[in-house]
Image (cartoon, rainbow, N blue to C red):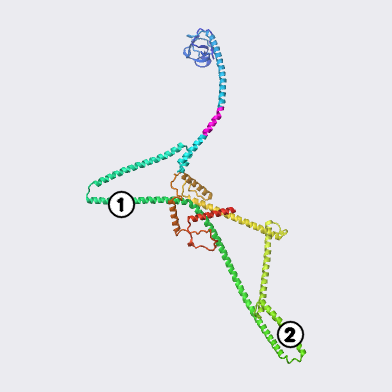
Amino acid sequence: MLSRVPAGCPTFGGLGNCAVLALSSPAETGQRGLWVAVATPSGQVAARRCRAAGVGAWCLEEPWCQFHLRSQTGGDTTGQRGRSSCCVHAEARGRTAGTMQSRRADISQQTQELRNIITLQEQGKKFFTQSSEEKLSQNRDLLPRLRGMVQEDIHALGIAQKHDQLIISKACRAEKNLDIVLAGKTVEGAREKLQSSIFERVNACNALLYEVRRRGRTQDELQQRLQQLLDVKIDDKLLQEQVQVIRQLENSIEKMLMKVHTGQKVTLLYLAVRDVLKKELAYLPLHLDLLHGMAGVYHGELEDMELTALDALKANDITKEELAKLETEFLAERELRHRSLAAQKVQIDRLWLKDASEKHLRAQARYDLAMDFASLLPQDSLLGTKLEATKSQIEHEARVTSEVEKAKAAVQCSRLWDITGRLLAQQKSTAELEQHIRACEEKKRALKDMLRDLELKQAELKFRQPPGAISCRRLEAELRTGLQQEEARLEQARAQSLRNQELLLLFENGIDNLFIRLYGIDVPEQDVSIELKGVDEKLQYCEQKLQHLVQRVASLPAHSYSPDEDNETFVKVRNFLEKTTAREPQNLKISLEDMGSAVQDPFDFADKDQGLVLTREDIKKQGLHLIESKMKSGKRK
């Protein structure tokens, strides 16, 4: 707690522009030391702590003032309660007690100055606000122009980028992979990339030139050494031996060089053949799949033909059995007919003999009558009656003769005794035919009744209602139409299921073939020990392999060799392989369908040795024909 210093205390003093306003003892503050309230030269009041300068004496030293305080009691004030009066003994060089009034005037003057400063600050703030608003309006006017300039810069940047891409594409026209790599880079990056490759090539060329120069120097040294050796005089025998050794070495070197050149040619030919085979291998799966599908179709047709042949054989066996039965029946009927005709012939012969004897007797009677006619003239009455009887008998014989001739013409017989046999045979055959017709009609009626009963049972089972209220004919017509519709739907469903099964089988075969072809490719992140059973798992496995292959192909450098139809080496190698394949007797021969030929007999099988090895043109024709047939079938559907 501070205690104000009594005014006019003779012990008060100070150095500098300062004044002590109050004091506090250690007992009042509870802290060590003496605290004083001091008025600074700027007019502010500050609390300062005085350090102990002895018993009952304290000292305050500041840059702007210096005090020496001493208590009147001359003892330690620690532990005292209440206020202690003290006198300030200051060795002053400054002001007196009258300076307080001048300080108040200075404070009021400073206050007025501060007010003026605040007013000026407010005015400056207003001016700053106005200037900021003006700058804001200017910036708003400037913003559209800046936007237009930015758009122009963006347009110019796009044109520059297109120009850069055009330059990069022109520079990388020969290498497409390098163009793809440099597509996202700037001209500087592309220039650095191309310069790096050029620098690498230049370094390689420099290394090769250095190697050539070194070998040239070595060759010159060896030639000089050889010349020196040639200049040296050697004995004749030793010289001949050395010359012979040199010739042998030259011959062996030439042979070795020929072998090296031959090996290089064989290596180049092997590489070319390998590339061609790789190219062909890329197209072979399609042809193999096509041939596999054609083989499946031919196999199905062959099975159908085998089934047709089996049905024909069964029908032939049944026909033979029926013909054998009919033959036995015919032989039995013919034997029976011969027996009946023989019996009838005996009877007819007896009747003919009887008729002949009667005719002979009648002729003999007419002859006797004619001979006796002259002797019987006187007897006129008797003669008239006999003549009338003779005329009536002659007319009766003429009628009988005409009817017999008609009967002969009707039954086509030349003899009279055959008429009765023919008539009896016709009557018997007619009776047999009528009996057979009656039996067939009875079977037909029985089958119709059975069909009606079955249809009624079907209607009962299908509709669960008694068929008494529905007409049998109407029910029969409805059932027949429904049966036809269901059969048509069943055929459509069977055809669709067969097509789906064929597509599924083709898809599974393709996935299996792809799985087998990709089995030898190793993927770092793939587990090979897992067994793949389903089609989906195999498809995912193949997808991972193919992605890995795509990444590997993208990372490979561009190859300068690209076999096509314009490459003579490619065409020669392909023709050579096709010819050797066609001449190979162990190859499977496949007969192709002739598009312009007539319809081939299904039982006219071609000879096995008269086949044809497929060539490139045949494969193309067959593929085009298959594509056209598929397109036509798709349009029909």
Question: For this rendering, which residue is in front, 329 or 292?
Answer: 292
Q: Which residues are magenta?
A: 140-154
Q: Position of residue 333 (x, y in %)?
A: 63, 75
Q: Is residue 412 left or right of residue 570?
A: right
Q: Position of residue 22 (x, y in %)?
A: 53, 12
Residue flagged by tag 2: what amino acid is it?
Lys
Identify the residue under disc 1: 251
Q: Secondary structure at mark 2?
A: helix
Q: Secondary structure at mark 1?
A: helix
Magenta-colored segment: predominant secondary structure: helix
Instruction: Name the residue rendered at 53%, 33% in the picture.
Output: 151
Distance, label 2 to label 1, CA atoms, is 144 Å
Identify the residue under disc 2: 391
Q: Is residue 148 left or right of residue 353?
A: left
Q: Is residue 575 left or right of residue 394?
A: left
- Is residue 113 magenta-colored? no
442 to 74, vertically: above or below: below
Marks 2 and 1 close (CB-CB < 8 Å): no
Instruction: Name the residue rendered at 67%, 62% in the picture.
Output: 451
